[in-house]
Image (cartoon, rainbow, N blue to C red):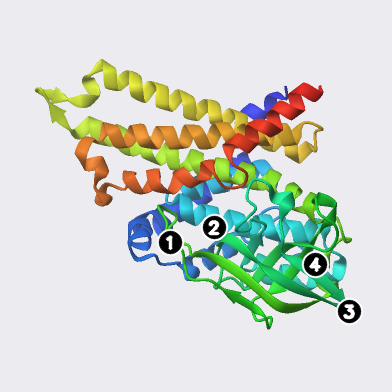
């Protein structure tokens, strides 16, 4: 294995430091308030674009930063130490923008990406439907060709930024059943026939709106199709390789923040005549939490490096990293809550929010059960 995976370059350390500084100043102090009020802080989100986070791995000619997947993991991990939901929202935008950069033609790249990399526009990724989650290839939203347009009818479910974001990258059925009948269309928010459901009430991720995206005879130019008809499922899956790394990185950041809070708390809290961090049982617990986070971090960074190199087994490692990092992040956050005792259950300490935010990471971008299916399929094929 490449030894360079285990050390960061000076540039990567600078990216990490810059993101942490922004997070500590602009995100962490307000995260509890955003969560309580279900407030999407668009001004702060758009401010990240000035730091190059509107198109982290989008090419430079359209305003992107053209950084690596490992660089992106460092950014989203650092942002998530302040608020996992904030980081995840920006990571989804980046996944959608990359899909246009990678699979769009030059006209599409020039039309959409400058707006996305500047975050004048923010993008949503629309794959899941009310009747198709893990079985994504069974999607029913249909786009019927009508001259130079498609007419879209159907509903997408659990869409982050629905009703707020300006662009929707939508997987639709243009052909027969199964993955080969799926295409990808770009649908701006102001398109007639596009509407949105009521905001969902959720366990976590409260600072970002989640709702249905509804298409009723929604007409979109054929020019808004990414690549060829029938290639949409491949495009969606390619986007998810990076998306899985990003959401894993968000879990690492959230888990690390929870552990850091637990270290501070146990160093201050007294019981039975001494600080509770002097009890070996709690020391061992925190040692295990730190070890598991570091193991997940190494696996995720390794998977990101493989995706950067376009290794043949990159998808397998992305699935491994997503499964492991999201399970570890959630477990560590839950243990951190326990270390806080009753105070961990109170909103003001910030740990219960991390627990709530990280729980969904084990579900989205492919459930961790689907990750196991992908991994098993790959290792059995070897």
The residue closer to the viewer here, 69 or 194, is 194
- Residue 109: image tag: 4
Label 1 residue SS: loop
Q: Foreground: 148 or 11?
A: 148
x and y percentages locating residue 124 in the rendered image: 63, 63
Foreground: disc 1 or disc 4: 1
Q: Which of marks 1 and 4 is nearer the N terminus?
A: 4
Q: 249 or 174, which lies in front?
A: 174
**Eye-nearest disc, 3 or 1:** 3
Q: Which label number is shown at residue 148?
A: 3
Residue drawn where x is 68% and y is 83% of the image? 192
Marks 2 and 4, how far apart at CA: 22 Å
- Label 3 packing within 10 angstroms: few (<14), some (14-19), many (20+): few
382 to 229, vertically: above or below: above
Q: Residue furthest left?
A: 273
Question: Which numbered disc flags the more N-terminal residue, 2 or 1?
Answer: 2
- The picture quadrant where one finds residue 169 is bottom right
Q: Work out whether residue 189 can be spotted.
A: yes
Q: How crowded is mark 4: few (under 14 residues within 10 Å), some or many (20 or more)?
A: some
Check residue 89 in the rendering and tell me which mark sits there, or answer none: 2
């Amino acid at each position: 294995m490449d030894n360079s995976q285990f050390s960061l370059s000076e540039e990567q350390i600078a990216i990490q430091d810059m993101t942490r500084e922004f997070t500590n100043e602009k995100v962490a102090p307000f995260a509890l308030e955003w969560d309580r009020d279900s407030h999407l802080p668009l001004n702060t989100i758009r401010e990240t674009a000035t730091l190059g986070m509107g198109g982290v791995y989008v090419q430079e000619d359209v305003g992107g930063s053209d950084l690596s997947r490992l660089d992106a993991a460092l950014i989203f991990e650092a942002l998530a130490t302040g608020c996992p939901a904030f980081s995840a929202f920006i990571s989804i935008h980046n996944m959608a923008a990359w899909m246009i950069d990678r699979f769009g033609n030059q006209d599409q790249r020039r039309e959409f990406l400058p707006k996305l990399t500047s975050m004048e526009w923010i993008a949503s990724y629309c794959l899941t439907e009310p009747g198709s989650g893990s079985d994504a290839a069974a999607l029913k939203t249909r786009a019927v060709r009508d001259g130079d347009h498609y007419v879209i009818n159907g509903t997408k479910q659990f869409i982050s930024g629905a009703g707020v974001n300006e662009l929707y990258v939508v997987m639709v059925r243009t052909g027969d059943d199964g993955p080969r009948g799926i295409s990808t269309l770009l649908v701006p928010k102001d398109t007639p026939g596009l509407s949105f459901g009521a905001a969902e009430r959720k366990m976590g991720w409260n600072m970002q709106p989640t709702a249905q995206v509804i298409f009723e005879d929604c007409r979109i130019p054929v020019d808004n199709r990414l690549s060829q008809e029938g290639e949409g499922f491949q495009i969606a899956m390619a986007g998810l390789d990076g998306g899985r790394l990003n959401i894993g990185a968000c879990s690492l950041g959230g888990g690390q923040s929870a552990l850091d809070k637990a270290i501070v708390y146990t160093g201050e809290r007294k019981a039975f005549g001494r600080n509770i961090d002097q009890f070996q049982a709690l020391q061992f617990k925190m040692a295990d939490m730190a070890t598991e986070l570091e193991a997940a971090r190494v696996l995720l960074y390794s998977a990101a490096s493989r995706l950067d190199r376009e290794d043949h087994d990159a998808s397998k490692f992305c699935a491994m990293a997503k499964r492991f990092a999201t399970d570890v992040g959630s477990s560590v956050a839950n243990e951190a809550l326990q270390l806080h005792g009753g105070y961990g259950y109170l909103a003001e300490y910030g740990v219960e929010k991390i627990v709530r935010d990280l729980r969904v990471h084990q579900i989205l971008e492919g459930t961790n059960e689907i990750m196991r299916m992908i991994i098993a399929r790959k290792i059995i094929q070897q």
